[in-house]
């Protein structure tokens, strides 16, 4: 099907400032996940997956441990999930996922990014219905049929499977993430996932000219510079 998705690694840091932002985002997400679901990765599958992804993205162990230790304390910040939706150049749809301890501040910061680039912040649900909320698992392999059989035996509601250049990509509803991941581990042992996460995948894409692309790049840069922003998804080709 050739469905486009955005691997978080593409935004991995090239400067110390960028690295600091990436580490901070992982630390915040680990803290929230551990505080809500338990600090033991064995029993908290979300935390275990998040830690594995952080390590692959070269987040230092001390950053991970500090976030978990902070969650053990029981107090600390009270972060909430905030999601904003809007439109970039050429009608490109944008979803901004945040973790915030001050929703009013975060909304103002996100709105300013859209306003300064002459883009439009929409209402809740204005674009998310045009994205598929998917679990994405990418790993080395070529036996697409064997992977499908393993997932079907585990009663996983598979959306799509692609095989290309020695890599298999599994798409499933976000609610099937843990079931799909565990089914693959049970069937094939220790799978080294290149991509192991939940994303919003656009159902359609917007083609941008050079000028529009420059605006889109600026919008994404400004959003990614915000401390509260965890992920940005968009439909720009």
Image: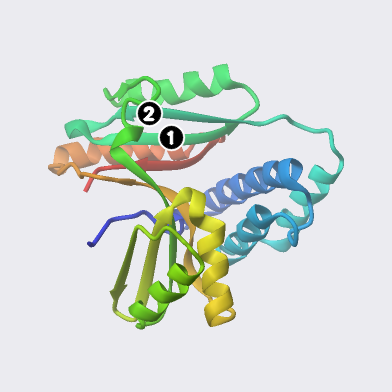
Q: Residue at x 44, y 26 (%)?
A: 110
User: Considering the numbered disc 1 on the image, is that residue within a helix, a strand or a loop?
Assistant: strand
Say if residue 29 shows up in the picture. yes
Q: Is residue 187 left or right of residue 75?
A: left
Instruction: Locate the N terminus by quadrant.
Output: bottom left
Q: Residue 171: x, y in percent? A: 38, 59
For mark 1, what is the residue? 96
Q: Which residue is mark 2?
A: 85
**Quadrant in which residue 90 is drawn:** top left
Q: Secondary structure at mark 2?
A: strand
Q: Is residue 107 above or below residue 4?
A: above
Q: Position of residue 17 (x, y in %)?
A: 55, 48
Residue 72 in the figure: left or right of residue 112 = right
**Percent coordinates x, y for residue 27 in the rendering:** 67, 48
Say if 122 sits above or below 23 in the image. Answer: above
Q: Is residue 68 left or right of residue 1?
A: right
Q: Which mark is residue 117?
A: none
Q: Residue at x 30, y 69 (%)?
A: 162
């Amino acid at each position: 099907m050739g469905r486009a998705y955005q691997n978080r690694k593409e935004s991995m840091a090239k400067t110390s400032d960028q690295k600091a932002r990436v580490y901070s985002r992982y630390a915040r997400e680990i803290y929230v996940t551990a505080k809500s679901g338990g600090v033991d990765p064995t029993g908290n599958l979300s935390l275990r997956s998040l830690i594995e992804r952080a390590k692959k993205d070269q987040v230092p162990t001390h950053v991970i441990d500090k976030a978990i230790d902070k969650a053990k304390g029981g107090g600390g910040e009270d972060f909430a999930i905030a999601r904003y939706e809007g439109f970039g150049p050429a009608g490109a749809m944008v979803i901004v996922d945040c973790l915030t301890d001050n929703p009013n501040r975060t909304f103002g910061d996100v709105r300013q990014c859209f306003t300064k680039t002459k883009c439009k912040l929409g209402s809740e649900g204005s674009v998310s219905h045009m994205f598929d909320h998917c679990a994405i698992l990418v790993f080395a392999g070529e036996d697409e049929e064997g992977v499908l059989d393993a997932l079907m035996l585990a009663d996983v509601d598979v959306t799509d499977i692609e095989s290309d250049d020695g890599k298999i990509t599994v798409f499933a509803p976000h609610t099937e993430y843990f079931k799909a991941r565990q089914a693959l581990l049970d069937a094939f042992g220790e799978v080294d996932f290149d991509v192991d996460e939940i994303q919003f995948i656009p159902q359609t894409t917007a083609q941008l000219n050079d000028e529009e692309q420059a605006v889109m790049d600026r919008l994404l840069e400004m959003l990614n510079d915000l401390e509260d922003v965890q992920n940005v998804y968009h439909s720009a080709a």
